[in-house]
Image: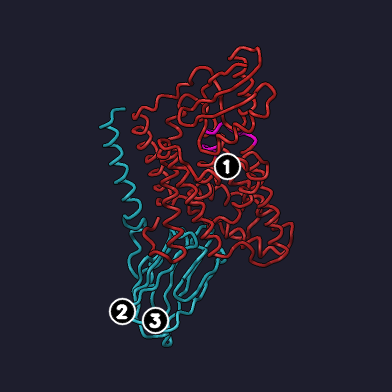
Chain colours: A red, B cyan
């Protein structure tokens, strides 16, 4: 019987200890596993004759998918020099300023008259994807993408599922709107509340990306966090979030929903909403896969912090606008 | 990048954002009570009509009308697909997504003087005010 002490990374929360000990305790070569969260170490009792390095590789392979790594040497985190945040704030603000300036300039208020065909709804989708709707849907995509990439979860699959969920739900719900001719999902209070929840998620993830919570390691109460971690790995969650974007408050989406509503048949509603979602796709794909590729590059720390600043800005905007939309506060600004 | 430089750039960007958010209208030619070069408030047959253009925001953003007479709000859309099409006027309980092109008439009843009317779009980033004198 030997006892090894390894370094472990990725332990966000108290429940990580339970999860890791559970998973590793089930392995044959492990007699006992004990995580020390404070020191970020794990003590393994084993009868295996393999070298400590080999055991570390085997153990890592079991919990890698959950975002943890076991190593003999302490993995030195990218040195968290304060310089990064000072670069990230102006970069993030620059993107925010450009984005809102673009809204204010009125370039995006293109007139599209006449009959709404799938082609026009595709174009409207393209416009919507760079409009103020980006503040909510795009902000949510950016924050989730960056967070998922940061946690080293298989991001490509998650993103694809999200976008597929989005396309399919838009098409099907559009078709349903066409048939029913009744207002599902365009209840103002409901969408506003959903928008406020989305903005709170963005604010939370944004603060997380900037690193506000990094010091005390408390991200969420461990129970909730554990729930999220488990859900993240399921196919269902990204599909569901994609589905949920149908109901997020976005003027363009709502206009298209009304158009689908008036279209009178399943297929015309189906194609109008599908073409619209397809139009928004390029920008959203760019956001999710763009952030993933940055996340795996050497600019990762800078990217996460800049993305965090952008997401906090968009989240605040969405929150204040959402509260104004609900009539809780007076409208503060006109973009 | 040097920390001081960065702080200066940050301040500059914050000011720029402030101007974008709270600065003047992007359509300077449309002042108060003017829409599309015409008077936006008129009284016909004892009924006051207030016209608001909804496209990429509301215009005029601030109107002044008389209180104490029957008033109707007319919201005009013209190829409007953005947020301004989903209009909320809480004080009269109006919530609707307007047709992309057309006119919508909203009965405001008899507004009291000194109680401004606020209309916002569903997401809350566009708004207009009507002051009743």
Where residue B60 sits in the image (x, y, percent)?
A: 38, 66
Residue at 50% x, 17% y is: A73
Comparing A207 with B58, the one in front is: A207
The Cα atoms of the two marked residues, 3 and 2, are separated by: 10 Å
Q: Is residue A99 left or right of residue B64?
A: right
Where residue A176 sits in the image (x, y, percent)?
A: 71, 60
In this figure, what is the number of numbered marks? 3
- Verify CB contact (< 8 Å) between mark 2 and mark 1: no
Judging by the rendered image, the residue that carries numbered circle 2 is B133
Which SS type dominates the magenta stretch? helix
Q: Is residue A239 left or right of residue A5?
A: right
Judging by the rendered image, the residue that carries numbered circle 3 is B111
Question: Residue A226: which disc?
Answer: 1
* Image height of B63 relative to A245, above or below: below
Q: What chain does mark 1 sit on?
A: A
What range of the chain is rendered magenta? A145-157
First in residue order: circle 3 vs circle 2 = 3
The quadrant in which the N terminus of chain A is found is top right
* Image height of A143 relative to A29, above or below: below
Determine the secondary structure under disc 3.
Answer: loop
């Amino acid at each position: 019987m030997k006892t090894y002490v390894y370094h472990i990374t990725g332990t966000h929360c108290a429940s990580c200890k339970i999860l890791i000990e559970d998973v590793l305790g089930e392995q044959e070569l492990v007699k006992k596993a004990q995580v020390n969260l404070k020191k970020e170490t794990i003590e393994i009792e084993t009868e295996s004759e393999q070298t400590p390095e080999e055991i570390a590789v085997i153990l890592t392979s079991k919990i890698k998918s959950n975002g943890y790594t076991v190593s003999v040497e302490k993995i030195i985190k990218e040195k968290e020099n304060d310089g990064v945040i000072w670069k990230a704030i102006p970069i993030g603000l620059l993107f925010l300023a450009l984005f809102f300036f673009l809204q204010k300039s009125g370039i995006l208020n293109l007139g599209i008259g006449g009959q709404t065909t799938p082609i026009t709804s595709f174009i409207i989708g393209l416009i919507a994807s760079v409009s103020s709707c980006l503040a909510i849907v795009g902000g949510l995509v950016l924050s989730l993408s960056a967070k998922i990439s940061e946690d080293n979860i298989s991001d490509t699959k998650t993103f694809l599922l999200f976008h597929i969920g989005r396309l399919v739900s838009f098409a099907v719900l559009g078709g349903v709107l066409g048939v029913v001719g009744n207002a599902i999902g365009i209840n103002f209070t409901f969408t506003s509340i959903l928008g406020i929840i989305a903005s709170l998620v963005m604010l939370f993830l944004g603060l997380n990306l900037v690193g506000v919570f990094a010091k005390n390691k408390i991200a969420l109460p461990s129970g909730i966090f554990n729930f999220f971690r488990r859900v993240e790995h399921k196919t269902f969650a990204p599909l569901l979030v994609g589905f949920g974007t149908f109901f997020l408050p976005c003027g363009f989406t709502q206009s298209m929903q009304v158009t689908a509503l008036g279209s009178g048949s399943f297929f015309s509603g189906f194609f109008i909403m599908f073409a619209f979602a397809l139009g928004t796709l390029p920008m959203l794909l760019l956001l999710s896969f763009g952030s993933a590729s940055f996340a795996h590059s050497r600019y990762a720390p800078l990217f996460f912090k800049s993305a965090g600043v952008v997401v906090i800005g968009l989240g605040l905007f969405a929150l204040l606008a959402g509260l104004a939309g609900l009539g809780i506060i007076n409208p503060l600004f006109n973009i | 990048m040097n920390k001081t430089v960065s702080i200066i750039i940050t301040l500059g960007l914050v000011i720029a954002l402030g101007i974008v958010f709270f600065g003047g209208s992007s359509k300077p030619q449309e002042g108060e009570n003017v829409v599309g070069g015409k008077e936006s408030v008129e009284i016909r047959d004892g009924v006051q009509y207030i016209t608001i253009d909804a496209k990429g925001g509301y215009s005029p953003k601030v109107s002044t009308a008389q209180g104490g007479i029957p008033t109707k709000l007319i919201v005009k859309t013209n190829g409007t697909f953005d947020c301004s099409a989903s209009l909320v006027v809480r004080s009269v309980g109006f919530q609707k997504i307007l047709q992309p092109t057309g006119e919508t008439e909203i009965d405001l009843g008899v507004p009291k003087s000194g109680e401004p009317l606020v209309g916002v779009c569903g997401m809350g980033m566009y708004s207009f005010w009507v002051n009743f004198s």
